[in-house]
Amino acid sequence: PLAESPREVRARLETVLRDARSRTAGLVDAVSDDDLRRQHSPLMSPLVWDLAHIGNQEEMWLIREVGRRAPIRPDLDDLYDAFRHARASRPDLPLLDPTQARDYTAGVRHHALEVLDASPLSGERLVDRGFAFAMIAQHEQQHDETMLATHQLRTGPTALRAPDAPRVADTPTVDEVIVPAGDFVMGTDLDPWALDNERPAHRVSVPAFAIERFPVTNERWCAFIDDGGYERPELWSERGWAHRVEADLTAPQFWERDVDGRWFRRVFGTMTPLRPNAPVVHVCFFEAEAFARWAGKRLPTEAEWEKAARFDPAAPTAGRRYPWGDDDPTAVHANLAQRHLEPADIGAYPGGVSPLGVHQMVGDVWEWTSSGFESYPGFTMFPYPEYSEVFFGGDYRVLRGGSFGTDPVAVRTTFRNWDHPIRRQIFSGLRLARDVA
Ligand code: AVJ
Ligand code: FE
């Protein structure tokens, strides 16, 4: 969380801004300028668009809004407005070239740090305590995860490298914990990093339910495939089956089978034997729903997910920032921050377990929930409607917990992500739940 004194707040904000920029640089410097301009999938922007968009958001929020300074490049606002141009059309726009985009974002950052230096970073209101800087650092990290997904879609030789994610010799048995009925606190008022859709804190009463201790693994997904999971309409919702047929889904995205029937995954350009005990990744909501029905269970609701992640029976009115408590995430707690380019085996993070005994809720894979993206009671839009408000009630499902590609500043137990139910180029997996009597 943001530290207490203005001096500490400033140091923390400088650090997160710098960390986000070095990650961005790593993602863009890994490929050629031609590659930065290329569109690797109609679902994604060319990487050079994300780069300049990061700079443009920072200019709008830190230079103009917070700093009250004159615009640097007002002519770019339209090009890099995500609502004006669909991703598919972005390569045809007169975008900044890679050198111009690098220079622009670097120039904006120079001014942003001057604005930070001149900010008091104290006061009652979040804005006075540096919220806009924290928001911009999260925004850049969110785009970095999107750019990582673009890298995964790239064809050609591997451009990114990282050590393999941790393996576990003794695979834990798949089992579940029972979450007792009762109120818990959903969302937050206090977390200075929380975005508008995570607010306000409110009590939610949840009937008792069971939730699995681990995300669903590749091995279980293979059993689903072998049992005809993709061939049996009764396992799918009506919309889900229509999508399954139309998109010809037969396995998670990036899975390929060799002549002997062994499964491989293309992981950032490298064919890799499927890791049986790692969480499945790159499944859409409709596939997740079908898997759950096949397993005789269901997806958790968003409230169930959050309760399993942060409810502590010993402190029922407090909500934890992370399943393990309020300490900043490290490599002991969770597979985050692109430290690895894949999910880790289940059981690899005993240091990150929640008070109720649920593992790997933060990191590894985003987990689909059955909930649509809606505002919490008492929601106030802040600071702009295009972050959350315009998406409420749309055709989205909420995902929770972050993935191996999510930075710690961009995830916590209250953090809400959302996407269309057909999307699977994101680092999405699932965890199962069920009703209990
Ligand atoms: C919260 C991941 C759904 O990428 O569309 C980035 C984040 N908002 N720029 C997205 C976001 C504006 C957003 N998600
Ligand atoms: Fe954005």
Image (cartoon, rainbow, N blue to C red):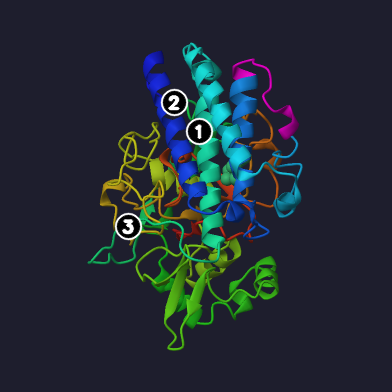
Labels 1 and 2: the sequence-earlier one? 2
Tell me which image quadrant ligand 2 sits in: top right
Are the residues at dot 1 and dot 2 in contact (C-beta closer than 8 Å)?
A: yes
Mark 2 highlights which residue?
13
Q: Is residue 299 above or below residue 304?
A: below
Q: Residues within 10 Å of mark 3 (few under 14, many from 20)?
A: few
Q: Quadrant of the N terminus?
A: top left
Q: Amino acid at mark 3?
A: Pro
Q: Name the residue tied to disc 1.
A: 137
Q: Residue at x 55, y 19 (%)?
A: 127
Cα–Cα gap, marks 1 and 2: 8 Å
| Residue at which label 3 appears | 163
Q: Amino acid at mark 2?
A: Leu
Q: Quadrant of the C terminus?
A: bottom left
Tell me the residue at 65%/51% (across/down).
Answer: 45
Q: Which residues are magenta?
A: 65-76
